[in-house]
Amino acid sequence: MGAGRLYAAVAAGGFRRYATYRTATAAGVFTNTVFGLVLVYTYLALWDARPHLGGYDQAQAVTYVWLGQAFLSTLAIGGGGFEDELMERIRTGDIAIDLYRPADLQLWWLAADLGRAAFQLLGRGVLPFAFGALFFPVALPADPLAWLAFLGAVLPAMLVSFGIRFLVGLSAFWLMDGTGVVQIAWLAGYFCSGMLLPLNVFPGALGEVVRALPWSSLLQAPADVLLGRADPLPTYAFQGAWAVALLAVGRLLQTAATRRVVVQGG
């Protein structure tokens, strides 16, 4: 019970930390809305030329765009999560302080990141999505159960996102400079999550591969649940399997790294 309260407090702290940056949040809402507009008009032109591309009609494609803008910062697909801070703490040696805390390193960062993600979803994700739903034709379910099913896919998406980025952060234990790993993760996240184009559009073997990768749990899986194109239970199972696998690998790497105590710079 005490540990549960500790991590709940860490999550609340993560939420409050990002809530203090009101100007940055407002700028982020504006940026996501503008980027969403660019993508929407691009999608409308593409779907005019190729109706029902990827099995979506225009309204579903537009909905997909605004959902992506809501999730971009929530899941830190383009960066902005905890991984840069974790890598810097490893590089400077401050990670030693973290290891002395009466808390598990992975769970500590997970709780903080869930708090951050919750704020980004509410503070930066809802407004662009609401703007898109107000000014463009969208395909939103009328059944409250469909929305509950969608929300059920959001938490495992957060866990998968954390699992990927925790591995990126831990790479700093072995690399002098993790910039390259961060950039690769950023590019893979954009391409393989479906942020640029729905993964349903990808043809043949390429489509099968990207839909089987963990990044598809971030945007494509929740979007298909919301749009009624995927059964929630198999979707949860897919996301959950990747979350467990990534967290387990992260646990193994954490154990290997802390045993060696390879703290660069300290």
Image: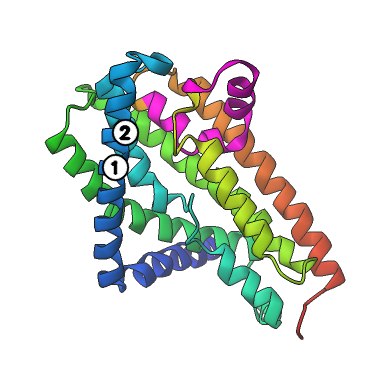
Query: Which residue is pictured at 67% across the width and 44% down the height?
Result: 246
Question: Could you tell whether 149 is left or right of 203 in the image?
Answer: left
Residue 181 on image: x %, y %: 67, 57
- Do the CB atoms of the residues marked 2 and 1 lie less than 8 Å apart? yes
Residue 153 vs residue 103, the one in the foreground? 153
Residue 164 vs residue 61, the one in the foreground? 61
**Image quadrant containing the C terminus:** bottom right
For residue 150: magenta?
no
Q: Compared to 35, does 123 lie above or below?
A: below
Q: Amino acid at mark 2?
A: Thr
Q: CA distance from mark 2 to mark 1?
A: 6 Å
Query: Which residue is pictured at 66% across the width and 48% down the height?
Result: 247
Residue 96 vs residue 71, the one in the foreground? 71
Q: Quadrant of residue 28?
A: bottom left
Q: Which residue is mark 1?
A: 38
Q: Quadrant of residue 210?
A: top right
Dominant SS of magenta comes to helix
Residue 153 on image: x %, y %: 43, 34
Q: Is residue 57 visible?
A: no
Q: Residues within 10 Å of mark 1 (few under 14, many from 20)?
A: few
Question: Could you tell whether 243 is left or right of 194 in the image?
Answer: right
- Please identify the residue farthest to the right as the structure is shown: 260
Q: Which residue is mark 2?
A: 42
For residue 208: magenta?
yes
Q: Secondary structure at mark 1?
A: helix
Q: Amino acid at mark 1?
A: Val
Q: Is residue 133 visible?
A: yes
Residue 2 on image: x %, y %: 53, 65
Residue 100 on image: x %, y %: 69, 79
| Magenta stretch bounds | 201-225
Query: Which residue is pictured at 28% across the width and 35% down the height?
Result: 40
